[in-house]
Amino acid sequence: MQNIALITGVTGQDGSYLSEFLLDKGYEVHGIIRRSSVDFRERIAHLEGTPNFHLHYADMSDSMSLVKLVGKVQPTEIYNLAAQSHVQVSFDAPEFTADVDAVGVLRILEAVRTNHLENTCRIYQASTSELYGKVEEVPQNENTPFHPYSPYAVAKLYGFWIVKEYREAYNMYCCSGILFNHESERRGETFVTRKITLAAARIAQGKQECLYLGNLDSLRDWGYAKDYVECMWLILQQEKPEDFVIATGVQHSVREFTELAFRHAGIELKFEGKDLEEKGICVSVTNPENEHLVGKTLVAVSEDFYRPTDVVNLWGDPTKAKAKLGWNPQSTSFEQLVQLMVEHDMAKVAADSVASKVRTNLAEYLEKGLVK
Ligand code: NAP
Ligand code: GDD
């Protein structure tokens, strides 16, 4: 029988890697997209036109669209990745976040039941380490109590419990992966890691003067997104549906991430001062053309990036995933992750600047009538 996957959130970081992973495994992959004024789906553009890859319009806030789509696709596996996934934004748009991240999960479960697929379709729910929030123990495992600490986390907590409820009430194969932060060169540009790697690349190439961040002391367990999508699939291949913590088991601060990212961009930083007065000052550079940066403040703290309540101590214990899924949490180390993101962004900034030079030259030539 052909494996048919339906992915919500297919245009996101994880959706794009998961699509590639499942297509490689021979799945027929269907993804949900929503109408946007800019129809540029950067992360999956390379997959469009692939014979087994299909996109459909639907929305997590529109039950009827989900019911109809699940009925049409008849998936054997659903990966529910769609979410308003930015924690800080959830303080500005809490109701939308709850609708998509909490009730959206219920809508998917009900769409499966409405189409009488509860015995044939397995469901993966993209749960999160944010559930541990104001943490009650370190490191966190499957038995650590939850203490959600943002509108996003509260919405995701509903998602976690409704999945557990449907598993027990209706005997459905549905489970949650409690994933700790995972990053990549496809990470959204306002999440802290990508914001840092892009800024390091821009500063190293003279395109930005200073990077403004919030809480530098915040601790995260950062892994590589490409490694984590494999776990989503493994979780759905187990005999019994169970929830899993997926993490590297290694913790670093935002400050450490920043130092390492700038080092890979050829800039050595030294942090001085405390809290809002803390600054990252350039102490040396590898590229002689950047000598003028030495002594300058390249990283500063801004209150704008502080959250009303912040989660500051995430550190996952992947013992269960290692033992039951046979998964290697260290296949990409923190150092490799930072390096691959910075290398990608150094190349991207260089390419953007060539493209922009070509555009400027072309505009000038057109103006002078040198090209028609
Ligand atoms: P992402 O890059 O922000 O992608 C989110 C996806 O959800 C996008 O495809 C987005 O579509 C879609 N979406 C948002 N609202 C929607 C709606 N109303 N209807 C349909 N689709 C909608 O997130 P990600 O990093 O890939 O994360 C994937 C999932 O894992 C999310 O549920 C996130 O909360 C969870 N998670 C992520 C991490 C992490 O570190 N990355 C850790 C734990 C859990 P558009 O492209 O149209 O906006
Ligand atoms: N975004 C951002 N921007 N965060 C900053 C900044 C900044 O300028 N400065 C410091 N931080 C701190 C945040 O306060 C937070 O403590 C930490 O860096 C990580 O922030 P994000 O990268 O925005 O990620 P997140 O941990 O809040 O949420 C991500 O991971 C969750 C899993 O734990 C998202 O992907 C969520 O969807 C996911 O559930």
Image (spheres, rainbow, N blue to C red):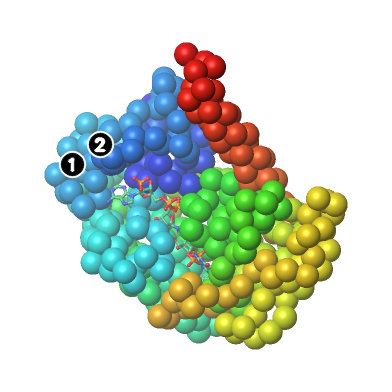
Tag on residue 29?
A: none
The reply to whether the residue tagged 2 has its Cβ within 8 angstroms of ligand 1 is no
- Residue 59 visible in the picture: yes
Q: Determine whether 80 is above or below 43 in the image.
A: below
Q: Residues within 10 Å of mark 1 (few under 14, many from 20)?
A: some
Q: Secondary structure at mark 2?
A: strand
Where does residue 138 sit, x and y in percent of width and height? 59, 79
Q: Secondary structure at mark 1?
A: helix
Left or right? Give the position of 168 relative to 210.
Answer: left
Residue type of the residue flagged with mark 1:
Ser
Where does residue 262 sit, x and y in percent of width and height? 72, 59
Q: Determine whether 191 is above or below 173 in the image.
A: below
Left or right? Give the position of 4 relative to 130.
Answer: left
Q: Residues within 10 Å of mark 2 (few under 14, many from 20)?
A: few
Query: What residue do we see at 38% from left, 70% from top?
Result: 153
Query: What residue do we see at 40% from left, 80% from top?
Result: 308
Instruction: Decide which of 268, 6 is in the foreground and name it.
Output: 268
Instruction: Decide which of 164, 80 is in the foreground and name it.
Output: 80
Query: What residue do we see at 52% from left, 36% from top?
Result: 21
Q: Are marks 1 and 2 in contact (CB under 8 Å)?
A: yes
Q: Residue furthest top?
A: 372
Mark 1 = which residue?
65
Mark 2 = which residue?
57
Query: What residue do we see at 40% from left, 59% from top?
Result: 85
